[in-house]
Amino acid sequence: MIDFHCHLDLYPDPEAAATGAQQDQVSVLSVTTTPSAFTGTATLAAGRPMIRTALGLHPELAHERSHELPLFDELVCTTPFVGEIGLDGSSRFAQTRTVQAEVFTHILRSCCDVGGRILSIHSRGAVRATLDALRESPDAGIPVLHWFTGTARQAEKAIEQGCWFSVGTSMLISARGRELVAMFPRDRVLTETDGPFATHEDRTVVPSDVAVTQRLLAACWDIEPSQAQDLVASNLQALLASGAEDRSAARPGDEPPTT
C-alpha cells in the first residue's frame, strides 16, 4: 500500500505512527511543512525503509517562514522529494498570496538548480496560479497534485502539463471527487491519506487507511481492489524510476520504499 502524502511528524505520537506504517507495510512519503522540521522528521525514517521524507514549506506558513528559504536551498540536495509546497487561494490566506507566490517560485527554481525533484503540491483554490508557476519552471521536477479540488477544465490542463495526482478517501466519497479521479490518467495516480488532517468515520486517518482508498479507487475504476493496488504500486515504481531519486544524496534510513 502507498500513502504518498502524510504528515507523520504532526501525529500526537510520530514514532508510533511511523512504526505502524512500517509494520503495516505502507510506503509513506512523510511530507514536512517547514524546512526546519525536515531533519528531525527524517529521523522517523531511520530503520524504517518504507518511509521517505520530503522537504517542504507549506503555503499556509509561507508568510511566517520565508526566512527559512536559505535552509531549504541547503537541504534540497539531500532528498529527491519536496513537499508540501504550493499555493493556497482560500480567503483565509488572501493577504499572503504575494509572499506565497514568491516562496513557491523560489522553491521551484531551487529544485531546477539541483536537477529536479518529485514534488507534492498543494493547490487549493489556486490551481491556475499553481499550473502557471509550474509552466514557468519546467525543469523543477515531476509535480504530484495532492488532494486536487479544481475544476474539470483545470484537471485537463494539469494532465496536459504532465501532472500526477495523489488521491485520498475524502475525494472518492463525493460524486464530484470521483468525476475528477475518473479523468486522471490511471498511470499517474497515487493514493494518500493527508493524515493526521483527514478523517474517516469520525476518526483521524493513519497510513494503513489507504486500504480504504484503494477499495474506493477500484470502484471508481470498475476493477478489483487488488488490481488497483497493483496499478498504484506500479505507478510509484515508475515515478521513482524517473531519475529524480538518482539526482540526490541518500540520507541515513532513506532506503527506497517498497510496495
Image: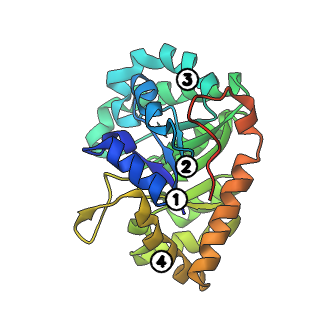
Residue 22 relative to residue 135: left or right: left
The residue that disc 4 covers is: 216
**The image quarter in which residue 1 lies:** bottom right
Check whether the beta carbons of the residues at disc 3 and disc 4 lie within 8 A of each other: no
Question: Which amino acid type is shown beneath numbered disc 3?
Answer: His
Label 2 – label 1 distance at C-alpha: 7 Å
Residue 14: in sight, yes or no?
A: yes
Question: Which amino acid type is shown beneath numbered disc 4?
Answer: Leu
Q: Nearer the viewer, residue 28 or 243?
A: 28
Residue 161: in sight, yes or no?
A: no
Check whether the beta carbons of the residues at disc 2 and disc 1 lie within 8 A of each other: yes
**Earlier-in-chain disc, 4 versus 2:** 2
Query: Percent x, y for residue 152?
Result: 54, 66
Q: Nearer the viewer, residue 24 or 109?
A: 24
Label 4 – label 2 distance at C-alpha: 23 Å
Question: Which amino acid type is shown beneath numbered disc 2?
Answer: Met
Query: Percent x, y for residue 229?
Result: 60, 71
Label 2 – label 3 distance at C-alpha: 30 Å
**Earlier-in-chain disc, 2 versus 1:** 1
Q: Residues within 10 Å of mark 3 (few under 14, many from 20)?
A: some
**Earlier-in-chain disc, 1 versus 4:** 1
Check whether the beta carbons of the residues at disc 4 and disc 2 lie within 8 A of each other: no
The residue that disc 2 covers is: 50
Q: Residue 106, labelled with which disc? A: 3
For the C terminus, which image quadrant?
bottom right
The residue that disc 1 covers is: 25
SS type, badge 1: loop
**Earlier-in-chain disc, 3 versus 1:** 1
